[in-house]
Image (spheres, grey):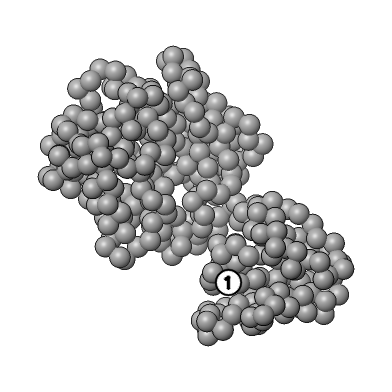
Amino acid sequence: MNYILKDENAVYHECGFSCDNEVFLKLGSESFFLTDARYATEAKEFIKSAQVFLLDRRDPFKAVRALIRKSGIKSLVYNPLEWSVQEFEGLSTRLQINFKKSINFSQKKRIIKSEDELLVLRKAAKLGAEAFDEFAKYVRIEGLGQSEKRLFNKAENIFKNYGELELSFAPIVALNENAAKPHALPSTLVLEKDMLVLLDAGVKYKRYCSDRTRTANADDKMVFQKDAKFKDAKKQKVYDTVLRAQEASIKKAKAGVRASEIDRAGREVIEKAGYGKYFIHSTGHGVGLDIHELPIIGARSKDVIEENMVFTIEPGIYLPNVFGVRIEDTVIAKANGAEVIG
């Protein structure tokens, strides 16, 4: 297959290097990485599997078109989500070839992780879990009386390991009613004893992402473990329901099952408990170089799970203006079940 890529993670997966101004071409048996002079030295140093060319500053796709013409190819696959209208017009209007749309074809290529990738993902998950423990300790000692915004800023620093790591995404630190918003933004709400605390966060290790969510009760014994205990009976009931749902979905997750079956296993638990309308998102998503990859673990997903696919399982119940609970782990699908990596 002849194809062209611009997405940084997609390009990195092809050749082990990427930057914010690049084009990657696969033309027959040859591979080409094109960038500007700012990144040429590093590209030539790190890329062993592709020839490095410079982009023209006045016409960014001139060199790309020249390589395509020289190759003599008749068709080229591209992901339309990677291109602006202006960029694609600049490339395609001067080439007499067939451009074939294929949404997320790079993610489809890398949906099954190699053993090397799995090692990196396990390490990312371990580093992320350690940051959860450190943030819980901070909340126990210094968290009461602080706003979500202050707690959010502290979580960012902890998960970045004060500059040593990158974040998979901006962490979500949500208290009580704000936790009823799945992607809550930090507010001025102040943490008080026995409030519900939801933390969703992850780190990058060698560019691969971790992703985890825990919900806990704020007190002097708070930890982000799954055996959370709440003084409020309703919070405990909802929490226990979400935990049973997650356990049901994890139990279902293995090679050969449909992703929709994994979603259904947990959703049925929540529906039977009377909270079905409050589970408002899919059960999970793939994780890798991107924080959201394939497969999709949802009710309408057509994906069939294969061994060494990596994805989250994260059911939740969100009671508007009251509180929300989500429990999330990243898992590796195996023939006989799911390996939970955290």
- Which amino acid type is shown beneath numbered disc 1? Asn
Q: Secondary structure at mark 1?
A: loop
Circle 1 residues within 10 Å: few <14, some 14–19, many ≥20: some
The image quarter in which residue 23 lies: bottom right
- Say above or below: 161 vs 197: below
- The C terminus is located in which quarter? top left
> Where is residue 104 shown, x and y percent of the image?
65, 52
Q: Nearer the viewer, residue 19 or 247?
A: 19
Q: Nearer the viewer, residue 194 or 331?
A: 194
Q: Nearer the viewer, residue 60 or 314?
A: 60
Q: Residue at x 86, y 66 (%)?
A: 97
The residue identified by callout 1 is 21
- Say above or below: 59 vs 225: below
Left or right, 115 with respect to 142, comes to right
> Where is residue 109 shown, x and y percent of the image?
65, 56
Q: Is residue 251 visible?
A: no
Q: Residue at x 86, y 75 (%)?
A: 72
The image quarter in which residue 179 lies: top left
> Where is residue 2 shown, x and y percent of the image?
77, 66
Left or right, 246 with respect to 252, comes to left
Left or right, 117 with respect to 28, comes to left
> Where is residue 64 shown, x and y percent of the image?
73, 75
Q: Is residue 302 visible?
A: yes
Q: Residue at x 31, y 28 (%)?
A: 177
- The N terminus is located in which quarter? bottom right
Q: Residue at x 66, y 70 (%)?
A: 24
